Image (tube, grey):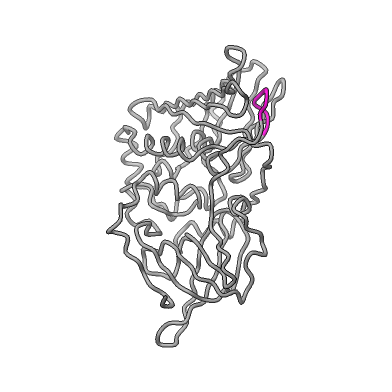
Amino acid sequence: MTECEFVDLMSTPRVEGVKKLFIFLIVMTATTVSAHHSEAAYDADSVAAFQGTVTEFSWRNPHAYIKVETTNADGTQTEWLVETGATPLLVRSGWTPESLVPGDRVSVRGSPARDGRPNALLLSMEKADGSVLAQSIAYAVATGSTSDLSGVWKGSRTTFESFAEQLLNRRLTEKAAEAQAQFDLYSENPAAACVAEPTPTIVALTGVFLTEIELGEDVIMMRNERFDVERTVYMDGRGHPQSTERTVQGHSVGSWEGGGTLVVDTTHFADHKNPTMDGVPSGAQKHVVERYTLNDDGTGLTVGIFMEDPEYMVEAFNVTFDWTYRPDLRLLRFDCDLEVARRYTRQ
C-alpha cells in the first residue's frame, strides 16, 4: 500500500442519510445529516488509507484525536489529524489512554475531509503488531434482569436507525425550513460549547452512550454519558411551572401508569439548534411525552416517545426504542473539554 491513497466507494451502495446521521451521533462531529449539509466535514462515501507514525494521542472529549505523520512520494511529510469518538465509546471498544504512544507505526483507514485537508474520521487503525483499533457500538445484549427501571441501560442500533429515518422524513413548517436554510453547522453547533442535545435525541443516544435511571419517591434521575447529562423528573405531583424560563432539557414531571409504566412529560425547552434536527430549534410549545415499560422477563424495556412542536413540525412525531439491561457496565465521565469541543466549528 502506498503512503496515502483514496478509495472511491461510488461503485458500492452509497451510505444513506440514516446511516450518515448515525455516524454523526457516534463521533459527534460534522458528518452529513441530510442533503441540507452537502458541505459537511467528512466524505462517508470515500476512504483515505495511509501509513505513518503516531506523533500525538489526545484522550479527551467530546472526541479523541490522533496525529499521524506520513511521508509523501517526494519525500515531504504530511501530518494527518484523525478523529475518533468520545472516550466512553472507545473504552467499551477496548481502548485505553495507552493504546497509542508517539512513535507507533500505524496503517489508517478513515473517511477523508471534504475540503482536502489531511483530516480523517477513523474507521480502523492497525498497529505494527497486527492489533486493530476501531470503534464499536455493540453491547445491546442484556446481561441480567431487573424488577424495576433502575440501573444501567443500553439502546440498540436498529431502533436508533428507525428514529433517524423518521427524523429525516418528518414534515416541517415554513419557519423550520427557514431555520434549516440559515443554520451554519460549523459556527452554531451547541456541542462546540459542550451542550448536549435535548430529548428525544438524548434518549436516542442511549444507542451510543449509556443511560442510568435512579428511582426515588419524589424524584427520578436520568443520567446519560453524553456531556454528563442529568435530567430530573419530579414525581411529587407538581405540574409544569407558569414561568417562561426554558432550559435545554426542559422541565420534566412524571407519573406511573398502569402500575408499571413510567410516564415522563417535558415542556419548557430552550431554543437549542440541534444538528441532528438539521438546525431546527426547539419551539416554545415543544412537548415531549416518554413512556418507559419494563418487559416481562426484566431484561429490557420499551421507550415510546411522542413529540409535538407546532412552531416547527406540521404533525406530531412518534418513535419507539428498545433498551437492554446492562448491570455489568457503568457510566463513564464525559468531562467535556471546551478547547476540544470548539473543533466542531470550522477554523
Vertical side of 161 occupied by 79: above or below: below
Residue 105 in the image: state x and y as whole percent.
56, 75
Magenta residues, dominant SS class: loop
Q: In this image, 169 relative to 341: left or right?
A: left
Vertical side of 26 occupied by 326: above or below: above
**Identity of the residue furthest to the top in this view:** 258
**Identity of the residue furthest to the right in this view:** 217
**Identity of the residue furthest to the bottom in this view:** 75
Foreground pick, 102 / 246:
102
**Identity of the residue furthest to the front in this view:** 130
* Residue shown at 49% from the left, 25% from the top: 304
Residue 184 in the image: state x and y as whole percent.
39, 52
Q: In this image, 332 relative to 309: left or right?
A: right
Q: Quadrant of the N terminus?
A: bottom left
Asked if the magenta segment contains residue 150, the reply would be yes
* Residue shown at 59% from the left, 23% from the top: 294
Question: Magenta stretch?
Answer: 145-151
* Residue shown at 45% from the left, 42% from the top: 274
Tally of numbered discs: 0
* Residue shown at 51% from the left, 34% from the top: 199
Vertical side of 333 occupied by 111: above or below: below
Residue 343 in the image: state x and y as whole percent.
51, 60
Quadrant assignment, res 245 = top right
Q: In this image, 291 relative to 16: left or right?
A: right
Asked if the magenta segment contains residue 106, the reply would be no
Quadrant assignment, res 273 = top left
Quadrant assignment, res 306 = top left
Residue 283 in the image: state x and y as whole percent.
43, 32
Foreground pick, 88 / 34:
88
